[in-house]
Image: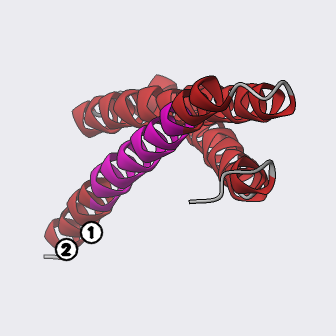
Amino acid sequence: MDFSVTTPAILFPATSLILLAYTAKLIHLGSLVRALKNKFQQQQQPGLLKEMENLKKRIFLIRSMQAAGVCCLLFCSTCMLCLFANWLLAAKISFSISLILLLMALACCFREIQISATALQIALQELEEDKK
């Protein structure tokens, strides 16, 4: 297998796009938290506390995704430096770690999507109950 600088370089655009998407999710959740806080201060409904707890979990996962993505880029960069220095074993180890970190970020993303979908299902059930 040929292992050159182009191998870790292929992760840069993908990881950058993922980090951008995670940041957009975090910004969106931030506005949701502020809206829920205002709504709770006005109405103090117990259901809002459940939603806020759900958002806490999602924010934690998004922060974890971002951390894993940033570390992925750091190890990818380290891999490229090792390749320039002709340290092939260190480069392979760094690249392997960056791939593991990318997988961790994607796993956190998958879990966050599951939590988000569950929250939407609960909200839809509440709407149906209010309709009856």
Give the magenta part as a residue range.
96-117
At label 2, counting other C-alpha atoms closer than 10 Å, the crowd grade (few under 14, some 14-19, many 20 or more) is few
Q: Residue at x 62, y 39 (%)?
A: 26
Give the main secondary structure of the magenta stretch: helix
Q: Quadrant of the C terminus?
A: bottom left
Residue 61, given in percent of the width and then of the height, sits at 42, 33
128 vs 16, nearest the viewer: 16
69 vs 39, nearest the viewer: 69
Do labels 2 and 1 touch, CB within 8 Å?
yes
Number of numbered tags placed on the structure image? 2
| Disc sitting over residue 124 in the figure | 1
Question: Which is more foreground, mark 2 or mark 1?
Answer: 1
Q: Is residue 116 magenta?
A: yes
Q: Residue at x 66, y 51 (%)?
A: 3
Q: Secondary structure at mark 2?
A: helix
Residue 121, given in percent of the width and then of the height, sits at 24, 65
| Disc sitting over residue 128 in the figure | 2
Q: Residue at x 69, y 45 (%)?
A: 19
